[in-house]
Each structure stands twice: as structure tokens, then as C-alpha cells.
Image: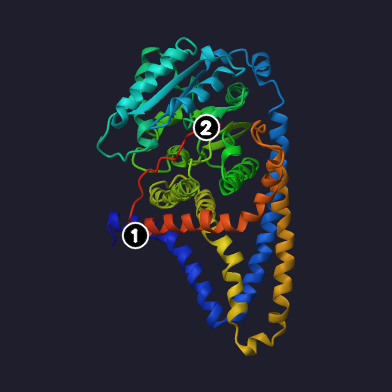
Amino acid sequence: MLSDYHRYRLYEILPGLSIWLTLVLCVVLSFVRPIWMIYVIIVFDIYWVLRVGYFSVYLILSWTRFMRAIKKNWFEFLQKDFPKWEEKKNVVFLPIYNESFTVLKETLNALQRSSYPAEKITVVIAGEERKKEHFDDIKEKVKEVFEDKFADLLFYSHPEDLPGEIPGKGSNIHHAEFEFKKYADKKNWAYEDIIMSVFDVDTVVHPEYFAHLTCMYCRHPNPTRSSFQPVTLYNNNLWESPAILRIMAFGTSFWMLFSLARLDNLVTFSSHSMSFKAAMDCGGHAKDIVSEDSRIFFQCWLRYNGQYEVTPLYIPVSMDTVTDHNILVSLKNLYLQQRRWAWGAENIPYLLWNFRKKKEIDWWKKATILFHEWEGKWSWAVVAILVTVLGRLPLWFASGEVRQSTIFFNTPYVLETLMTMAMAGLFISAIMSMLILPPRPRHYGHHRYLLMVAQWILVPLSLIFFSAIPCIDAVTHLMFGDYLGFNVSTKKRLAK
């Protein structure tokens, strides 16, 4: 009989094991049974072309909703259709570590530019005690510029080395939530009327974000049983970023657009909003993990026995790419950011562990949510390598007998045709990337637009070295119990 510790460790091993077994089996088959592997590759490539078509349809659908949403006057709609909208309390949590005041200032300026009245927004700035001097400096600058601009400005300093915590955004937010709870209790605010938005400190909201969010919250039949996920655009400093970073930023945004239209596997990611009641019911954001943004959804989903969802918001929030002054540092930042996101594989053992306790949840619901989470990490790690590298192995190392077969002669043409069909998804992404570009800074010439198109030839390189390999790195660490701490992404604006 396995102990609890060994059972959980087994669950942590399984995601990485499934990925490594796939990769090793493909290599072995390429040498031992190359014909089998050729058939596997053809079937997989057909499947992937269908997936690209599926992705493209939902991406275009989501794009039309996005374009329609950003043109609507949501605050006017809110006032007209929801007369009790002022009963809702919008509270923004901004965790900060070593980010500059310049980054935070732009975030707060965006809140002020909202169509939703800034004087009805409470801002919580959550700093770290281990960066006390920096946080004190930030606090003074914020008070000097933004005093009396919002409903209230609250500053909480997260003590270091609290038991049961790892340093990072999750533990910072967890502490700030329970400090804010004291504040809300003093004001006798009903938790179900508090809409909390947990943002990265570089999150620049669209002017209609809070009006749209409040509309959707008021319209929802049970808003305390839903999170609210906006479109995430990494374009604050897009023009200053290296091409690889831009491609990965667009890829993340397009994946989020796709996910918003396909609700069956939508999970909270990065900056999002939710009911304060739900956060308190599930114990607040997890303080001992890295992927707190997705984990809070699973906490609520389990707490409410599967009766929890994510409502899409087709209004964007803009964030920074992880650009630094040195391109090699920028690429390192990108790798570490992707590995941190892939560390979300820690949700798989968490779900497996808690499924045993949750007999009330239908097995099909459990299987569905587990499949989407597991298949997402598997595809992230395997697909790019399988399509670009492993798919060629049986053709390179096939024996003379295999080379005489009809399937061997026809396979290169079949694969070429399938990959050409799959290029349609890349073409759609390239077009959409031009449509969501922020305005071109004056110090860049018009020729820069050509680079924005040409950069897409780097997609195979980026998918292998800055997507698949960081994911494999993350799940391998999880397999061996070598737990990753929270890597703070660089949030800085380059001088113009």
C-alpha cells in the first residue's frame, strides 16, 4: 500500500513519463520498425492538420467577438441595463517585487483612463518585505502621484519566510487577500459584491475592461461560481522586443483567443478577475506553488464540486514581453518564463490527488478536465519535435528494403502536402499579428513592418527551443521532485 507521499510522487511522475515515453518510443521505432513509425507520423500529421483547421476556425470566431467587444461603450450599457451596478466593488490586486515605478505608473494610469469611474476602484499594491526599501520607495511615489485618484489605495507588505510558503506571486497575493479581508469586513462589504482582479504589475487594461467585467458579472446567473478571463496581449513593449519574443507573445495571445471561444477547456491564466467570495471559499490563492493563476480555478472547481467555470471577456489587457537590454538575457528570460508556465503541469497531480476525495463530482467531468490539462502539456512538449525532427528519423535511417517500398517513396510528398495545408494556420496568425500591433513608435521606420512579417520564418525554431524544450525541462524537474521556485519575469521598459 502506497503512503500518501509516494502516491503523490507517483502522480507527479506521470505527466513527464508520458512525454518521455512518447519521445523515446518514436526514436526506437524509427530504427527498429521504421515502417510503423512512418505510418504513425502520417496519421499524426493528418490529425495535426485537422487540429490546425479547428484552431483557425475558433481563432477567427474569437477574433470577430474581440473586434465587436472593443468597439462597444460598455459603461453606457452597464448604467442602462444594471441599475444596481454601483453595489459592486472592483478591487485590483497588483503584486510587485522589483519592478520599476515607471511600469506601475503606466498600469495605474490605465486604470484612471477607464470608462468605469476610477474613484470606484480600490487598488491593492502588494509588496515584499524582502524588498522593503524598494517597496517603500514605490509606496511614496504612488501616494505622491495617485493619492485621492481611486476609491482607496492599500499597501500590504508580505513578510518573508512564512511557514508553508514559497516566495512568489501566489504567496504575496494570498497574504494580501487576507489583509484585504480585514479591510472589507470593517466596511461590512458583502464578499459576493466584491469583484477582485488579480493582475501582473505590468497589466495595462483596455478603457472598457472594468465596465465590461462588471456587466458580465451582473449578467451572470451565478457570478460567484465563475472566474472572468480577458484576452491577454503581450504588446506593451512589443516594438522593442526581439523577433523570437514577439512570435511567442503572439502565440500566447492567439492561444488565449482560441481558448476563449472554446469554453470546455478554458482555465484562468495570468491576469484575470473573480468573486472575492469564491477566493475566500477556496482558501485564497495557493501560497506554496508556482502556477497560482491556473490553480485558483482548480481550487474553486473542486470546492464547488465541478460547478465552476470561466466566463470569457473579449476585452484585452496588455502586458510586457520579457525583454531586457541584452538579447541573450531576453532569450534567457523567455526560456524561464515558458518553463514557469509549463510548470503548470503540477496541476495534474493536484487533480489526481483530489479526485479521490471528490466522489460527488461525475467521473466524466473529472476525466474531461484532466484530459484537457494533461493533453495540453503533452502537446506542448511533443508536437513541435515530432513534426520537425522525429518525423524525419525513419526516412533518414530506413534500411535498403524499406527504401524500396511504395510508402517510403510517397511519404515525403504526403508530409509536404500536409505541412503546406498546416501553413494556413501560420498565415492566419501572421495576418492577425499585424492587426493587433500597437501603434508604431516614431523612432522606427516603416520598414519595421516588413520585419514583423518576416519574423514568422522563425516559428519552427521558437516552437522547439522556446516552447517544447522548456516544457520538457519543467515536467522532468517535476518527475524527479526537483521543484522549481517562482522565477520573476523581467518587467522593464527599454529607453526610447
The residue at the point 58 percent across, 75 percent down is 393
From where the camera sits, is residue 222 visible? Answer: no
Q: Position of residue 109 (x, y in %)?
A: 54, 20
Horizontal relation, residue 252 to residue 292: left or right: right
Dot 1: within a 10 Å radius of its alpha carbon, few (fewer than 14), some, or many (20 or more) residues?
few
Dot 2: within a 10 Å radius of its alpha carbon, few (fewer than 14), some, or many (20 or more) residues?
few
Q: Nearer the viewer, residue 167 or 39?
A: 167
Q: Secondary structure at mark 1?
A: loop
Q: Position of residue 279 (x, y in %)?
A: 43, 31
Q: Amino acid at mark 1?
A: Phe
Q: Secondary structure at mark 2?
A: loop
- Residue 352 vs 292, above or below: the answer is below
Whichever of callouts 2 and 1 sits on the residue coming sooner in the sequence is: 1
Task: Kindly indicate the quadrant of the structure image that contains residue 390.
Answer: bottom right
Label 2 or label 1, whichever lies nearer to me, is 2
Q: Nearer the viewer, residue 441 or 364?
A: 441
Whether label 2 touches label 1, CB < 8 Å:
no
Residue at which label 2 appears:
495
- Residue 312 vs 329, above or below: the answer is above
Instruction: State which quarter of the image contains the N terminus.
Output: bottom left
The residue at the point 68 percent across, 18 percent down is 77
Q: Can you name the residue that lies furthest to the bottom here?
A: 401
Find residue 480 and name its label.
1
For the rendered model, the colour scheme is rainbow
Horizontal relation, residue 173 to residue 263: left or right: left
Horizontal relation, residue 125 to residue 370: left or right: left
Q: Amino acid at mark 2?
A: Ala
Q: Nearer the viewer, residue 186 or 170?
A: 170
